[in-house]
Image (spheres, rainbow, N blue to C red):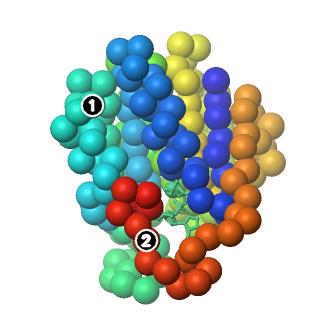
Amino acid sequence: MIIIYTGNGKGKTSAALGTMLRTAGYLKKTCIIQFIKDGSQYGEHHAVKHFLKDFVDMYQEGIGFYKLPGDRHDESDHRQAAAEALELAEKKMRSGHYELLILDEILTALMVRLISEDQILALIHSLPADLHLILTGRGATQALIDAADLVTEMQEIKHPFQRNEKAVEGIDY
Ligand code: ATP
Ligand code: MG
C-alpha cells in the first residue's frame, strides 16, 4: 500500500503514528524518517524510546523549519539535509528490515522545493512489494496522488490555533 496523508487540517502525522502502532501490534517493524525536523523530542519519540524500540526505528532528519522565523541555516544546508533524508529512506527501503516505512513531512519538503516530485516518484517506483509506504505533509501533487493507493486529505474545520491557543502536550506534540 502506498498511502498519502495530506491537507491543511491536523492529523497527518497522528494518522501515520497510529498505523505504526497497529503494525507494531503484529510484531512488525516500522521505520519513520522525519523530514524538516529539528531534533525536538515529542511524545512519539519518548513512546518509541520507552515502549516500542524493538519495533520502531525513528530518525529525525533535517535541520528544522525552512525559511520560517528562527531559521538560521543557509538554503544549501537545508537542501543537503533533505538529500540525506532521502538517501536514508532509499537505504531503509532496500534493507528488507521493515513492513512499514513512514516518510513524515516529505510532502512539506516537496512543497518548499527541497526535494523534487521526480525523486519521490522514483522512490515509489522502487518500493518492494512487501513494504507499505506512508507519505505525509501538505503539498501532495497530482502525480503522487495518481501513484498512491490511498489518499486522505485532512480538512480543517476548526482548530484551537485559530483562537491563538497553545499546542497541547500529548495532543499536538
Ligand atoms: P499532527 O502531528 O498533530 O497529526 P499534522 O501532521 O497534521 O498534525 P503538521 O502540519 O505536521 O500537521 O503540523 C504539526 C503541528 O501543527 C501539530 O502541533 C498540529 O497540532 C499543528 N497543526 C496541524 N494542523 C494545524 C492547523 N490547521 N492550524 C494550526 N496548527 C495546526
Ligand atoms: Mg505532521
Mark 2 or mark 1, earlier in chain: 1
**Residue 85 drawn at (x, y percent):** 40, 48
**Residue 94 drawn at (x, y percent):** 43, 22
Q: Is residue 3 left or right of residue 92?
A: right
Q: Amino acid at mark 2?
A: Ala
Which residue is denoted by mark 2 in the rendering? Answer: 167
**Residue 37 drawn at (x, y percent):** 37, 60
Depth check: give the residue in front, 32 or 51: 51
Image quadrant where one finds the N terminus: top right
Kindly report the distance in space between the C-alpha atoms of the residues bearing marks 2 and 1. Answer: 25 Å
Instruction: Answer above or below: position of 125 versus 142.
Output: above
Depth check: give the residue in front, 115 or 68: 68
Q: Is residue 144 left or right of residue 102?
A: right
Residue 49 in sight here: yes
Mark 2 within 8 Å of ligand 1, using the beta carbon: yes
Q: Amino acid at mark 1?
A: Leu
Which residue is rendered at x = 53% and y = 13% of the image?
Answer: 130
**Residue 28 drawn at (x, y percent):** 39, 17
Which residue is denoted by mark 1 in the rendering? Answer: 52
Which residue is rendered at x = 65% and y = 41% of the image?
Answer: 4
Q: Is residue 10 left or right of residue 13?
A: right
Residue 115 in sight here: no
Which residue is rendered at x = 58% and y = 50% of the image?
Answer: 12
Image quadrant where one finds the C terminus: bottom left
Instruction: Answer above or below: position of 169 versus 103.
Output: below
Depth check: give the residue in front, 114 or 28: 28
Asked which secondary structure carries label 1, the reply is loop
Indicate which label's residue lies in the foreground, 2 or 1: 2
Asked which secondary structure carries label 2, the reply is loop
**Residue 86 sits in quarter:** top left
